[in-house]
Amino acid sequence: MTSAHSGDSKSLEELRAKHKQESKGLLVLIRQLKLRVHREVEFRHQAGEQKCYLSTVVREKQSTYVLETLSFILLY
């Protein structure tokens, strides 16, 4: 009976060690995923700001072009 008990104890220790390794691996994976999500959120935020800025630049260029075209037409 002691040999069976020591075998159970050994397998229990192996299971605990395996569980500990798997837990560490999961924590590393969670950390990597959190960083990936953070980078993605930051990228999307910056892309939104760039879009607003470029839309403003295009709008200003278009209004300048329209004014120049109108003044050219009215002068001739």
Image (tube, rainbow, N blue to C red):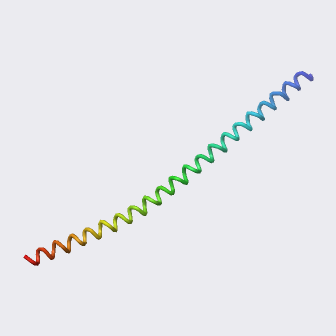
What residue appears at the point 85 percent right and 24 percent down from the top-left corner? 7
Query: Looking at the image, is 62 positioned above or below residue 4?
Result: below
Residue 61 image point, x, y percent: 26, 68
The picture quadrant where one finds residue 52 is bottom left
Residue 11 image point, x, y percent: 80, 28
* Relative side of 26 to 67, left or right: right
Q: Farthest bottom residue?
A: 75
* Relative side of 51 to 60, left or right: right
* Relative side of 5 to 43, left or right: right
Query: Looking at the image, is 65 positioned above or below residue 37?
Result: below
What residue appears at the point 46 percent right and 57 percent down from the top-left corner? 44
The picture quadrant where one finds residue 68 is bottom left
Q: Farthest left residue?
A: 76
Residue 42 image point, x, y percent: 50, 57
Quadrant for the N terminus, please: top right
What residue appears at the point 25 percent right and 72 percent down from the top-left corner? 63
Residue 20 image point, x, y percent: 74, 38
What residue appears at the point 50 percent right and 53 percent down from the top-left corner? 40
Quadrant for the C terminus, please: bottom left
Mark count: 0
